[in-house]
């Protein structure tokens, strides 16, 4: 999958300086990051709506549009696909370590009950009173 996204990203980079009249990508670059972000958000919502409606084919189509608009926003923000893959690999390494930790909170052995030494205050007070 990452190969497809990397090819798409390269295609976006190649198209960004084309004629906006004929290239959607060039048009998005001409209109700027706010428009790119709006389109990305719209695609994300379309994926959500189709997924909730159980329309798997539409989810596939809209996901491809989502990846396209994400690649456009990445390019505009100076983010490369490998930057994202590196972050994902870092998280995977961390999770891998975490997976070796016990999932439940570590159960410490209950400390032995400390015998409560009841100060014989009452007896002492009685003794003092008798003096
Ligand atoms: N991968 C894509 C790609 N995926 C989705 N889209 C466009 O993104 C739009 C997303 O769907 P929308 O429903 O939001 O769009 P729309 O409602 O039809 O029209 P708008 O309201 O968005 O203007 C679709 O119209 C698609 O044409 C893409 N447009 C271009 N590419 C690739 O980007 C490269 C550059 O192409 P140009 O931008 O045409 O130069 C090429 O390799 C293209 O294959």
Image (cartoon, grey):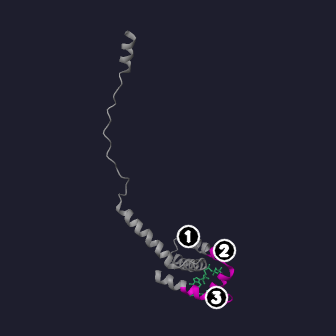
Q: Tell me the mark number nearer the camera, choosing from 2 and 3.
A: 3
Name the residue that disc number 1 marks: 48
Which numbered dot is residue 84?
A: none
Q: Tell me the mark number nearer the camera, choosing from 3 and 1.
A: 3
* Residue found at x 50% / y 76%: 83
Give the left or right position of residue 38, taking residue 4 as reference: right
> Ligand 1 falls in which quarter?
bottom right
In the rendered image, the residue lying farthest to the top is: 131
Task: Pinpoint residue 56: horizontal percent, then vertical percent.
Answer: 50, 75
Question: Between residues 69 and 13, which one lies in front from this camera angle?
Answer: 13
Q: Name the image quarter holding residue 28.
A: bottom right
Gap between marks 1 and 2 measured at Cα: 21 Å
Please report whichever mark, 1 or 2, sits nearer to the chain's N-terminal start.
Answer: 2
Gap between marks 3 and 1 measured at Cα: 32 Å
* Residue found at x 31% / y 32%: 115
Span shown in magenta: 10-39
Question: Between residues 40 and 87, which one lies in front from this camera angle?
Answer: 87
Task: Pinpoint residue 101: horizontal percent, then vertical percent.
Answer: 36, 59
Name the residue that disc number 2 marks: 34
* Residue found at x 40% / y 11%: 129
Examine the residues drawn in magenta and state their main secondary structure. Answer: helix
Task: Pinpoint residue 71: horizontal percent, then vertical percent.
Answer: 56, 79
Please report whichever mark, 3 or 1, sits nearer to the chain's N-terminal start.
Answer: 3
Which element carries disc 2, helix, strand or loop?
helix
**Mark 1 neighbour density, 10 Å: few (under 14) some (14–19) many (20 or more):** some
Gap between marks 2 and 3 measured at Cα: 18 Å
Name the residue that disc number 3 marks: 17
Give the left or right position of residue 122, taking residue 12 as reference: left
């Amino acid at each position: 999958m990452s190969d497809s996204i990397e090819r798409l990203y390269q295609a976006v980079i190649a198209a960004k300086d084309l004629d906006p009249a004929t290239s959607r990508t060039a048009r998005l670059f001409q209109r700027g990051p706010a428009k790119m972000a709006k389109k990305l958000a719209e695609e994300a919502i379309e994926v959500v709506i189709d997924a909730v409606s159980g329309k798997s084919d539409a989810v596939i189509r809209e996901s491809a549009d989502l990846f396209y608009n994400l690649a456009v926003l990445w390019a505009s923000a100076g983010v490369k696909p490998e930057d994202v893959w590196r972050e994902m690999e870092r998280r995977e390494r961390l999770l891998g370590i975490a997976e070796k930790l016990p999932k439940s909170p570590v159960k410490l052995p209950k400390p032995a009950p400390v015998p409560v030494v009841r100060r014989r205050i009452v007896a002492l007070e009685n003794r003092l009173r008798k003096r």
